[in-house]
Amino acid sequence: MNPALQGLVTIIIGVGGCLAYFYFSNQLLDKVLLPAKGPNAGRNTNRANLIRPWLFLFPAVFALGLYLAYPVVATLWYSLTDRNQGGAFVGLANYRQMMAEPKFWEALRNNMLWLIIVPAASTAFGLLAAQLTDRIKWGAIAKSLIFMPMAISFVGASVIFKLIYDTRPAGQNQIGALNAVWLQFDGGIGSFLILRLLPGALMISAAALALYLAWQAVQAIREKGMGAAAVLRAVLIAVMLYIAYATLGLAYGAFTNVHPYGVPQTWLTIPGWNSFLLMVVLIWIQTGFAMVILSAALRGIPEETIEAAIVDGANPFQVFFKIKMPQISGTIVVVWTTITLVVLKVFDIVFAMTNGQWETQVLANYMFDKLFRASDWGVGSASAMVIMLLVSPILIWNVYNARKEMR
Amino acid sequence: MDNIAGRTSALNWIVQISVVALVALWLFPTVGLLVSSFRTADQISGSGWWQSLTASEQNLTLRSGSAAEQELRDGVYIVEGNLFGTVSDADISVWGVTSRAIDSYLPGDTADLGNGETITVQADGTYVWSGTEELSGRGQRVFATATTPPEFTLENYETVLVSGNRTDSMTRAFFNTLTVTIPATIIPIVIAAFAAYALAWMDFPGRALLIAAVVGLLVVPLQLALIPLLRLHLEIGIGKGYLGTWLAHTGFGLPLAIYLLRNYMVGLPRDIIENARVDGATDFQIFTKIILPLSFPALASFAIFQFLWTWNDLLVAKVFLIDATGQTTVMTAQIVELLGTRGGNWEILATAAFVSIAVPLLVFFAMQRYLVRGLLAGSVK
């Protein structure tokens, strides 16, 4: 049968079936099983009302259970068994095998970088765009244009950015924008300013920010004393110190690295840089999302608070960082976690652009590789469980918040 | 509220310029793809797309008419014509006859090709190729550095959409994508709407637990579902195909659908529903006659999400749909395939990619209002 026709039939059967199920099951309940007539009318109505919610819920609960809840358990089980031994239980052997693979650690390391950089950059750009576009007349149009990449598939975006990163041999016209820009640099003063001073200064300010946050945490421990929160703060301090150390190292590199000026680069094959170039694709897509949400949050800030600050003589930066930021911090957390979830599942971009070569592997692609190319279901499931493990803090946090809200 | 901050016009200008820069930066990649899809292969590989918008100087490899067109005039064999095919606005600055020396001659010069053959090229591309003996071969190659005006073509779209070329044609993939998308968008809406109504307006034990479960399932990565479900599909005989894909998309889309719709329905005025109950309406009637029409905005926003998600999806299609025959390939999968086999053919790639992103972009711009509303309902708490 023609797929289009089949699709149409499915829509009719699927939708019609759903509607018919809901209609007839309700009819059955009300007219046949527990009619609201006769001697037991009252009791029947009560019973029918006990059953009815489950009629409404049944298809959804069934689909959720089968397509999301059951797989979590099944994947856990597969990760502990060996397909080649007929599904025998092998304990943690798959995990051990996975840990022994350098490619897994590469994927995990890259995923961590993605997890820090993409949400941070998207939120920062989104906040900047929201703050700027809210102040101008044609802001709605600007927003809509920055928001547009949301509609573009990861695969489409990969093609778009592959064109930007494209390389032609030296001497020919470069058709990739990145190389065309790169060839403008010749090691002169402009190159120093843009390729050394700018990134160096950015890295140093990032390090300073991390140290500042660490210092704040130290202060908080001093003031509030030891406890469960202190442990979390200590972890935060350690992470911040590491970030400061890493960014200072990068800053040093920015000033000392020798750049191959005038030579077109095949960007996607340079380990270290290529992962960042892939992240750019996702940042480009997610910034619009962050902008839309943060812009709504910024508009929701009561004007009195800002007026009061201005009357008290606050400058625009103080208004932004001391008045607006604290009021939208909840929304920033939501945006951050939502983008984190997207990042954890990122597969298409890496698959389409490098397929994990040149040290760009990420967990989701590693898993796909194991499942469908190496046909190793054990290790594939184990890596899927690693993704689940990384997601679960957000899952618990969301459920906790949702329950708090309902009370 | 910004006015009271005593904004100076200088600051205003800085804001305006920054926004222009930001928007330009965000549009640049997509525009590059769009422009490239209207250029020929030679144009794309000859110069960056940003140069195609203005008259630009390019190094071109051109060929004269073949020896079959030659005429005998006064004892000399001659082929005449224009290197650009028809009369063009191109302006040749220098040219040559070998790839090693592409700047040997100025317009109007005559190059000696040996064996009594010569070729003369004018600035506008007209040439005279002549020889004292009969000419042979496919035509003389000419390497020219020329300034050509912007020129665009629809050829690529013809190749990709209507040519029926086996590897490049996107027509089938387009309809396959459509076949996946439409049922995968509509079915979860129907199922989720009923469930959301029950979770919002019906009282039963375990309701809070179910809502928490839905919130939890919102973030479960679908990666976990791949193997167990593929196995299940193979065991119960669905195998790889549309049915399995529709079911998978339905399952993966349900948590968001239920979450969005419930949040919206809870906010509907209680009076309407209770009045209807008092008047003797059943839950089924309340749902279809009151709740559904009122929930249209939420339904629309989820529909857009699910449409974009299923249209742009690669992973689910690769796992649950595309079998070895490749008959059921979708556009995203085919583009990845093209990236592998035709990595250098940017005219095909760019056009195929643009065809695949055109529909979501249309939906996006037409229904942006609902999309934003859905995002806000889903995220801001």
Image: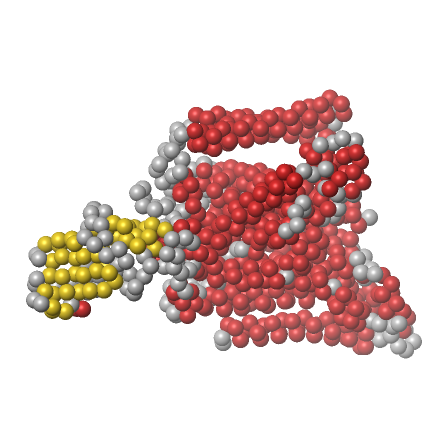
Q: For the point 54% across and 74% down, which residue is it?
A: A6
Q: For the point 35% across and 36% down, which residue is it?
A: A262
* Residue A207 coordinates in the image, percent (x, y): 58, 27
A50 on left or right of A200: right
Q: Which quadrant of the structure image shows residue A52? A: bottom right
Q: For the point 79% across and 31% down, which residue is it?
A: A312
* Residue B87 coordinates in the image, percent (x, y): 30, 64
* Residue A162 coordinates in the image, percent (x, y): 43, 49
Q: For the point 38% across and 42% down, which residue is it?
A: A266
B225 on left or right of A318: left
B229 on left or right of A231: left
In this view, B78 is above or below A366: below
Quadrant where the N terminus of chain B is found in the figure? top right
Residue A41 in view here: yes
Front residue of this view, candidates B260 and A320: A320
In this view, A350 is above or below A219: below
B52 on left or right of B285: left
Residue A370 in view here: no
* Residue B314 coordinates in the image, percent (x, y): 51, 57
